[in-house]
Image (cartoon, helix red, strand yellow):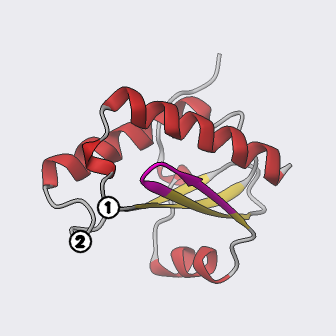
């Protein structure tokens, strides 16, 4: 049985990690209201960083809901994803999507990322 937690090792923790992905992102996956930038890492497991700005998602409750959905999605898919660093950016209007739609979008994005990164 796999561990389904979300430990620190699955997160991008500092500005340098984010900058590295922004500067060298060979993989771009678009979803409705979201964009994932990714680059390979040497760790053998995925790491994710989230950027949900006030400019694109006004209310804190919406930003927190979306972050929870993304973390849950990554937590369940962490063993299928290749070793990549991912930065997920929210776009305007993503807060209008319901939870089921966001989950479907993320599932499709992770599948496309798996295909392109392998």
Q: Residue at x 25, y 41 (%)?
A: 65
Seen at 41% across and 32% down, the residue is 101
Residue 14, above or below 34 = below
Q: Nearer the viewer, residue 102 or 39?
A: 102
Q: Which residues are magenta?
A: 28-34
Circle 2 crowding by C-alpha within 10 Å: few under 14, some 14–19, many from 20: few
Kindly identify which residue carries mark 2: 55
Q: Residue furthest right?
A: 118
Q: Determine whether, in the image, residue 94 is placed left or right of residue 27.
A: left
Instruction: From the viewer's perspective, tell me whether residue 1 is left or right of residue 68.
Output: right
Image x and y of residue 13, in percent: 46, 67
Which of these two is toward me, 10 or 107? 107
Marks 2 and 1, how far apart at CA = 8 Å
Q: Main secondary structure of the magenta part?
A: strand
User: Which quadrant holds residue 84?
Assistant: bottom right
For the residue labelled by badge 2, is the local secondary structure a helix, a strand or a loop?
Answer: loop
Which of the marked residues, 2 or 1, is nearer the chain's N terminus?
2
**Residue 18: x, y in percent?**
52, 74
């Amino acid at each position: 049985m796999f561990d389904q937690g979300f430990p620190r090792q699955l997160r991008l923790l500092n500005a340098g990690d984010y900058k590295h992905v922004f500067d060298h992102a060979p993989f771009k996956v678009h979803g409705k209201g979201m964009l994932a930038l990714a680059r390979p890492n040497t760790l053998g497991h995925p790491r994710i960083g989230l950027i949900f700005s006030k400019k694109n998602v006004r209310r804190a409750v919406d930003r927190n809901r979306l972050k929870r959905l993304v973390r849950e999605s990554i937590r369940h898919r962490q063993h299928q994803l290749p070793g990549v660093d991912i930065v997920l950016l929210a776009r305007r209007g993503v807060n209008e999507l319901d939870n089921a739609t966001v989950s479907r979008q993320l599932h499709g994005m992770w599948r496309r990322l798996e295909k392109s990164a392998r």
